[in-house]
Amino acid sequence: MLRRKKIILGVSGGIAAIKIPLLLRELKREHAEVRVVMTKAAQEFVTPLSLSTLAQSPVILDIFPQVRDSTLDASTWHIYFSQWADAMVIAPATANTIAKIAHGFSDDALSTLVLAMRAPLILAPSMDEDMYINVATQRNISLLKQRGCFIILPEKGELASGITGIGRLPEIPTIVKFIDKILKNGNQDLRGKKILVTAGPTYEAIDPVRFIGNHSSGKMGFAIANAASLRGATVTLIAGPTHLETPRNVKRIDTVSAKQMFDAVMDISHQQDIIIMSAAVADFRPSSVSSSKIKKEKTGTSFFLELSQTEDILSSIGKKKRKNAIIVGFALESQSVIENARKKMKDKNLDFIVCNNPLENGSGFGYDTNRVTFIDHNGKIEEMPLMEKFDVANEILNRVRSEEHTSELQSRFGISYAVFCLKK
Ligand code: CTP
């Protein structure tokens, strides 16, 4: 799978840098094209000459590289490489390099290139155990994960200090396999497509301090936005209130209430090729919002709140559906899942629907995993196993691609030809 793939290998200064010539040799054996960027500290552990010899190209050591390479312009090399690469792998990624990337520093060649990079970013943290489990490092890794960077977890074993603990760079075949998997998912099949994704809950105000909300974390929608962007789509993410970081290369519009989300979606839905509504939009809002904090009056009295229905965003888009546009909905159901989901798909005029059950272990709100069932408009049902939300996101996008393919065939050659091609 790595044949002719263009990989930037970023090396930062940890003892595991001594293993990087072996990683580089393996990538070259797999017929990948590799360019190397090193930090100053990395050069204390491995020489640029070793890496340039194995990469068969000069190594970038400085923000203003002094290399005799006709493809490199000293002032724009980072832009050139950010467009050239299919992926960037940083191994080992030290605590300092991880912190710099998490906070947007660009004070050396490696961090400058990362800021400009559009391709998938893969980091292999490797360091002493105490540095790895330090709250600051863990928080930085978590920030990068939320933005859609891929982390190759370090292994437990004997560290350079002689202490046994977590922090070892995984074996070379493990790293190569990981890179291979990421590149397989990021095959740019959505390049040129505009995708709108909604995510998270909505909050409906009761008074200036209270609201009605739900437990949606937004993780599923953010994973879809991230996966679509890695596959080359131009992605707009309309999010309800959530603390999640925006995935790399995704345009985010923040909303709070169902009405705000409705307006934001309606504003741009006509420009989209694909719309995926994963937000848990409130179905009801208080009929009137008090302008001052509601007092509890006498102790022990009840309080009644009148609610009215919110706009059904997905139904509104479904009614205006453009030819060839693909609309995907979610169905959160705790009983009669398939039956209810089928009804939603029909009522809301969807191409397919993703059902999940919030009562199932490992599924639904807050988890990093989900177990979903897909139903398409022909009634085909596919039950998926429990998977990481990022993998579920890619499965959804795979089905969007095949829906698009069918709809293209239908509009060009008619329904029976499309069915014939798909059966083949
Ligand atoms: N949805 C929406 N606007 C709403 C409510 C839901 O766009 N006001 C969308 C959701 O984003 C999801 C789909 O409709 O893609 C189904 O949402 P769900 O909460 O499962 O169902 P509802 O339509 O709200 O119906 P019910 O709550 O009665 O099951």
Image: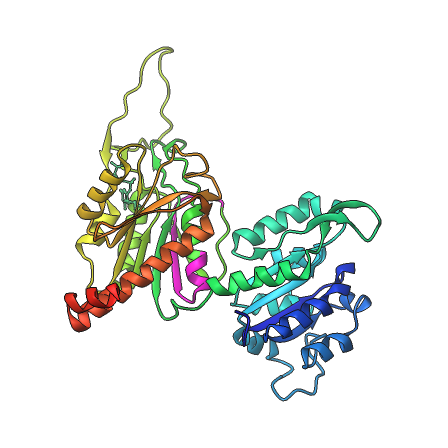
Q: How many marks?
A: 0
Please check the rendered image and state whether residue 290 is part of the magenta-colored stretch, yes or no.
Answer: no
The percent coordinates of residue 309 (x first, y second) are 22, 36
Residue 81 to residue 252: above or below: below
Residue placed furthest toward the front: 424
Q: Indicate the quadrant containing the C terminus: top left, top right, bottom left or bottom right.
A: bottom left
Magenta residues (range): 226-243
Q: Relative to the observer, which residue lies in front, 263 or 298?
A: 263
Residue 306 vs residue 151: left or right?
A: left
The percent coordinates of residue 135 (x first, y second) are 67, 43
Residue placed furthest toward the right: 162
| Residue that appears at 62% across and 46% down | 139
Q: Write down which quadrant ligand 1 falls in.
A: top left
Q: Relative to the observer, which residue lies in front, 279 or 5?
A: 5
- Evaluate whether residue 107 shows in this view: no
Residue 237 to residue 207: above or below: below
Residue 102 to residue 413: above or below: above
Image quadrant in which you'd find residue 284: top left
Please check the rendered image and state whether residue 242 is part of the magenta-colored stretch, yes or no.
Answer: yes
Residue 399 vs residue 2: left or right?
A: left
